[in-house]
Image (tube, rainbow, N blue to C red):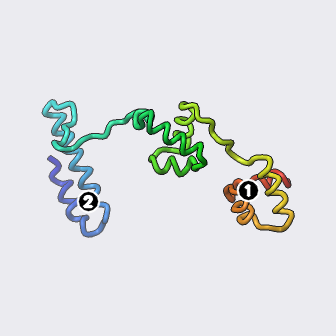
């Protein structure tokens, strides 16, 4: 169908690592043109391959699963760890917990943590160590200190 194109691609094969990708793209385009000319409008499904279906996140978990996740969260497990375990985003996990009526913990710094950060900083402790002691991230501590101390 494209006599000169494939010869050119074969000549360039020794010079470029991207030729294989371009060859695949040309082959795919060629097959698509052949399907269009034959009147086939839908792409064929390769036998044996299953296409993934998108489901609502809530459909992935039974009510019992969500109850167990909620209990673990209320027992003190971190939302980040639970989200990673179940292969969902942290924000999605928090939304599912809220839908289940689970009271989520306050995000960010509490007034007690803010006072502790300021106290430790006055003692000359570096930000990394303050963050570890208080139990928050380096960036959270650094940003708070920037806003609190001007």
* Position of residue 12 measured from the top left corner of the image (x, y, whole percent): 25, 64
**Residue shown at 49% from the left, 50% from the top:** 84
* Position of residue 83 measured from the top left corner of the image (x, y, whole percent): 50, 47
**Residue shown at 69% from the left, 62% from the top:** 132
* Position of residue 71 measured from the top left corner of the image (x, y, whole percent): 54, 41
Q: Nearer the viewer, residue 15 or 116?
A: 116
Residue 141 disc label: 1
SS assignment at label 2: helix
Q: Nearer the viewer, residue 62 or 9?
A: 62
SS assignment at label 1: helix
Residue 77 lies, with reference to residue 62, above or below; the image says below
Compared across the picture, whether 75 is left or right of 147 comes to: left
Choose the circle earlier in sequence order: 1 or 2. 2
**Residue shown at 18% from the left, 37% from the top:** 44
Residue 122 lies, with reference to residue 91, above or below; the image says below
Q: Which of 85 and 74 is in front in this view?
A: 74
Residue 82 disc label: none
Question: In the rendered image, which quarter is residue 63 located in?
Answer: top left
Question: In the rendered image, which quarter is residue 4 located in?
Answer: bottom left
Label 1 crowding class (10 Å Cα cut-off): few <14, some 14-19, many 20+? Answer: many
Give yes or no for contact between labels 1 and 2 (Cβ–Cβ under 8 Å).
Answer: no
**Residue shown at 26% from the left, 59% from the top:** 20
Mark 1 vs mark 2, CA separation in Å:
49 Å
Q: How many marks?
A: 2
Residue 126 lies, with reference to residue 50, above or below; the image says below
Label 2 crowding class (10 Å Cα cut-off): few <14, some 14-19, many 20+? Answer: some
Query: What residue is disc 2 on?
Result: 20
| Label 1 vs label 2, nearer the camera | 1
Question: In the rendered image, which quarter is residue 60 located in?
Answer: top left
């Amino acid at each position: 169908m494209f006599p000169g194109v494939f010869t050119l691609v074969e000549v360039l094969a020794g010079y470029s690592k991207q030729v294989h990708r371009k060859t695949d793209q040309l082959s795919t385009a060629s097959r698509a043109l052949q399907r269009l000319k034959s009147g086939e409008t839908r792409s064929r499904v390769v036998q044996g391959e299953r296409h993934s279906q998108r489901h609502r996140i809530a459909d992935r978990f039974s009510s019992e699963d969500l109850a167990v996740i909620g209990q673990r969260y209320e027992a003190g497990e971190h939302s980040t760890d639970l989200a990673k375990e179940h292969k969902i985003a942290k924000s999605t996990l928090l939304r599912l917990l809220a839908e289940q009526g689970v009271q989520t913990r306050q995000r960010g710094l509490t007034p007690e943590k803010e006072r502790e950060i300021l106290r430790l900083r006055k003692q000359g402790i570096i930000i990394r160590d303050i963050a570890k002691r208080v139990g928050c991230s380096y960036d959270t501590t650094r940003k708070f200190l920037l806003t609190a101390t001007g």
